[in-house]
Amino acid sequence: MAFFRRVTLLTLIVLSFTTLSNAQVKLSGNAPSYAGEVLTFCRYSDYITRTEEVLSKCTVDKSGNFNCDIKVNETTFIFSQLGIYYAYLFIEPGKKYEIVLPKHEPKTEAQRLNPYFVKTNLHIGIKNMQPNDLNYLISTFDLTFNEQFNIIVKNAYEGKKMESLDSLKNELEAIFKEYNNPFFNSYRTYRYGLLSQIALMQQSRSISSVYFQNKPIRYNNPAYMELFNLLYDKYFLFFARSNEGNAALTKVTNQRSYQQLNRTLSQDDLLKNDSLRELVILKGLHDGFFDDRFSRGALLTILDSLYSQTIIAENLMIAENIRQKVTRLLPGFVPSPFELYTVNDELVSLSKFEGKYVYLNFCTTTSYSCLQEFPLLEKIYEKYKDKLEIVTIAVDTDINDLKHFLGQNKYKWTFLHYGNKPDIVKDFDIRAYPTYFLVGPDKRLVISPAQSPNENFEQLFFKLLRSKGEI
C-alpha cells in the first residue's frame, strides 16, 4: 500500500543525517552465569506504541566476557530481557560502558509460558561509575523520587493532608541542580510534572500549558513521554465530552478527514503548535483503535492521510508503528506469523495451509467451553476438509496435557502447542477461550474474530464459499 511505499526526499535526508551522525557506544563486561547466552539490547522506536527495535546482539563467551557495539545519535534508553529481569540503561553517543549484569535467573517454565508475566525492573550497574554519570544521576534521583512519590500519591487518594510538593522538588533540586546534563534536567522536570498530575489531580489543561505548550517535543525521553501519554490518554473521548467537541469529532469520523480533525483541534490554544497537535492526534488514533466507540476504518483512513502529509520524521515512524500494530488483526491483513509444534515435534506455520481456508482457534483442554465445541468442529472438518483446515492452538501449560487429551480423543485436524511462542496469545489479543479467526487461502484474515461453531460458523462459511463460486 501507498502508506508503506512513501519515500520522500525529507525521509531520505533524515535517514542519511541519522546514519552520518550516529556515534558508536561500546558495552562490555564479564558475566560468567550468562556464558553461551546471546544478549540482545533494544530500544523503543516510539513511546506511544512501544514498538521494540533491536539495536545489538552479542554472545557471551565461555569465560563470561562480552562486547556489544551500538550506534545512536542521541541519549537513548535501552533495555534487555534477562530472564526474570527487565534490565535497562541510558547510553550516550560515543561512550564506553563496562556494565555489571545481575546473576542469570531464567524464568521458570510457568513464568515462560505466561505471556503476561511481569519482570523485575533493574537499572544495569556500571563499573567505576562517576557521580556525574547520567545513569548514576537518574538512578539516585529515582530512588528518592519514587519512594516519596508513592507516599504522596497514596496520601492524595486517601484524602490525607500532605506537605507541599514544592518541598520535595526543592529537596531534590538542592542535590541535583549542580549537574548540568540536558537530558537529566528534562527528565527531572517531567517527573515533577507527573507528580503534579497524579498527586494533585491537577487540571490537564494546566499541566499541558506548563509542560507541553511551546516546548520542544522530547520523543526519546521516557519521563516526557510518560507524562504525555498520561495527559493525552484516550484524548478523543475527553475531547468529545462537550456537545461541541462531540459534534466536531462525529463530523470528522463520518467524513474520515484528517484535515478537518487538524483544523478542529487547532482551535484549542494549547494545541496551536503543529508538531504537538500532530502528536496528540497520533496518540488519539492509537487509543481509538482499541475502543469500540470509534470506527476502525475511519481511524485508519485518517492515519493514512496524516502519514502522507506529515513532514516530521518521528511522526512518520509513530504512524507506521501504529498501523502495523492495529492492522495485524483486521480483516484483509496478514496476521502475525508463527511456527508452533505438534505433539509429534513437527514445526507448523500457516504457510503449510496456503490455498485453503484456515479456521484458527485458541483453546485449552481444560476449558469446558472449548471441549463442548470440539464435536462440532469435528463435523465441520469432515464436511469441508477439502477447502477448510482447522488449526487449534492449545494454551495448556504442560504439553503433556495436550498429548494425553489427543491420546484419548482421535480428532483429525491440526493441534499445535503454544509453548515455543507464548507471546502468540498477545499477538492475537486472546482474552477468552475459545477464540476463533478465519484466515483465507491467501493467508489474509477474512473474519476477525470469527464466530464459533455454536454461533453458526458453518452457515457463514457455506455462504462465503457460495458467494465466491467455490461450491
Image (tube, rainbow, N blue to C red):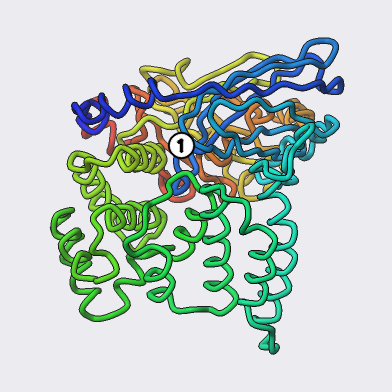
Residues 352 and 52: in front is 52
* Front position in the image: 83 or 90: 90
- Locate the N terminus and report the quarter of the image it occupies: top left
Specify the quadrant that holds the C terminus.
Answer: top left
Can residue 308 be seen here? Answer: yes
- Figure label count: 1
**Would residue 447 be visible to someone looking at this image?**
no
On the image, the x and y values in percent for residue 309 come to 17, 42
Q: Quadrant of residue 113?
A: top right
Relative image position of residue 19 (x, y in whole percent): 39, 21
Dot 1: what SS? loop
- Residue 176: x and y in percent read 66, 57
The residue shown at (72%, 21%) is 28
* Residue 350 appears left or right of 96: left
x, y percent for residue 397: 75, 37
Q: Which residue in the protein does label 1 denote? A: 45
Tell me if mark 1 has few (under 14), some (14-19) or many (20+) residues whose alpha carbon lies within 10 angstroms of its own: some
Q: Is 445 in front, or is 216?
A: 216
Three-letter residue code for mark 1: Ser
Instruction: Report the residue at 79% width, 39% height from top.
Output: 110
